[in-house]
Amino acid sequence: MLSKSIHALGLVSGLLLSSTFLSPGSAVAFDLSVAAGADPTTLDPRKTWVAQGYSINAHVFEPMFFRAEKDGNVVIEPILAESWAQKTPTELEIKLREGIKFQNGEPFNAEAVAYTINSIQDNKFVTNLKLWTRDITSVEVTGPYTLLLKTARPTRGLLNVLAQVPIVAPKAAQSPDFEKKPIGTGPYKIVSYVPSGQVVIEKNHNYWGKPGEADKITFRIMPETSTRLAALEANEVQIADNLPPDKLPALKANKNLQVVYTPTLRVDYLVMNFRNPLMQDRKFREALSLAIDRQGIVDNLLGGTTKAANSISPPGTIGYAADLPVYAYDPGKAKALLAESGYKGQVLKIGGPVGRYSMDKQVTEAIAGMLQAIGVNVEVETLAFSSYMAKYNEAAYDLAFIGQTDFTINPQKHWGTLFQSSIDINKYSNPEMDQIIEAASSELDDAKAAELFRKGQSLEHKNFGGALPLYYEPQLIGLGSKVTNFSPRLDEYIIVDTVKLKP
């Protein structure tokens, strides 16, 4: 992807790099290694639903539009698109850049965009991206580089949605090998992918835009935070994502490293499975929430790098309700509500990933201990992210740790899978919340939409419904001392095509 650097909101402090020098006086063959906390599970960008997958694919694929930050606000900028116009409240015309080719030589044009969107919407194609593209009712190719997107009704944030739709090469995408060796228009192309091992990409010398700095980038899959940290300290990798905040003082004291951290648009939740009859009781849900010491988790496990949640939405999104109080911690009241709820000692199965989110395994285990402290019997399972998500998507847990980012900056998309009855896999249902989400989805007036979003946050704050927000995910990234020009992003993408050796 043609990088649009987002201003670093965090702090930078040290770094280390392994690179291959050719001969005295010659150019440096710059090979970069990145430690990633989770396997992408697929390299087909239409199927990606993992942050590490987004980050890797962002070097290989490009969307028509993408997010950047200006003056502290997230804005949308054209990438493969050249211009756009809202012809009517339900029709968006897009004009594309000309003269671009995919890495296999296929032409990039309106037909490729139409193919990408239509393939995502195909009933036989399994992808969570359907959630984002569902408002598009048709894609009309009106010229070689012009198309018209139609929606059934006015739709908020359509450009934001399209930022999550990287364009694929139509012929290549029909190959059975596409999930491991996909083809895009970006500055890098796939060399190899070993599931749970590594992804190797190399510079696309025919790239239409500004070329990347590194000749080759290897993303090494390392679910354990201790493994990523050790690899960074040993100079086996030059960038490591999702480092443990409890190690922040030691990281900052290490002169061979630099640390970058930034707030993000991700909310970490404890998701409740409403197939379990216990979750239907508001008193039981409130007891669970009151048992969790969110501030204690932030201070003791996350190194004070973030804030305890006061809302189901993250700060920086439209209508974020900053005036809501942080969810309370009161184990005494939790015990009383548990008794009133009629809880009879049933075992709750709690699930969490390993290495996907900051201190996720430790947080999952800490929450289990807090619930046990008020008298809830629990069984804990933590798994590598790819294995965990398979079970999460089957609603295999009574309580499940998950993080969700509001990429669209419009909460009706962010809320859907947790708070909207028509698509929530955990069977939560609240007609009032459904109505709020539906109304917000077609409200084009920002002020009116913001009011709806605040109403939804207030409703779930009182109801403890769907999922219990815990805190806002911190992003903590370590770098070696010999590279420079990396910027963290609010959307947590780790885009490293601009990273280069220090002079």
Image: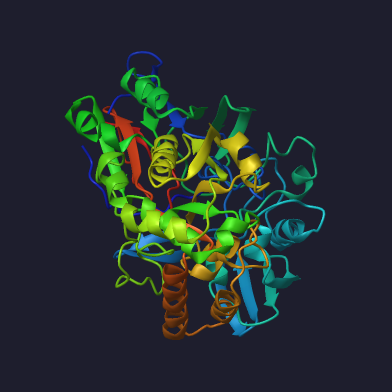
Q: Quadrant of the C terminus?
A: top left
- Please tell me which residue lies in front, 152 or 356: 356
Query: Which quadrant of the structure image shows residue 458?
Result: bottom left
User: Looking at the image, which residue is at 64% across and 67% down?
Assistant: 421
How many labels sit on residues? 0
User: Looking at the image, which residue is at 40% across and 26% down?
Assistant: 228
Query: Which quadrant of the structure image shows residue 349?
Result: top right
**Left or right: where does residue 460 sit relative to residue 155?**
left
Residue 320 in view (yes/no) = yes
- Please tell me which residue lies in front, 311 or 158: 311
- Please tell me which residue lies in front, 33 or 354: 354
Q: How is the image coloured?
A: rainbow
**Left or right: where does residue 100 sit relative to residue 240?**
right
- Where does residue 312 sit, x and y in percent of width and height? 44, 63
User: Looking at the image, which residue is at 47% across and 42% down?
Assistant: 211
**Left or right: where does residue 32 sit relative to residue 422?**
left
- Where does residue 208 sit, x and y in percent of width and height? 55, 48
- Where does residue 310 sit, x and y in percent of width and height? 34, 63
- Please tell me which residue lies in front, 357 or 500: 357
**Left or right: where does residue 30 sit relative to residue 7?**
right
Residue sticking out furthest to the top: 23
Q: Is residue 236 above or below residue 297?
A: above
Residue sticking out furthest to the right: 124
User: Looking at the image, which residue is at 45% across and 56% down?
Assistant: 338
Residue 80 in view (yes/no) = no
- Where does residue 101 sit, x and y in percent of width and height? 65, 49
Query: Which quadrant of the structure image shows residue 297?
Result: top left
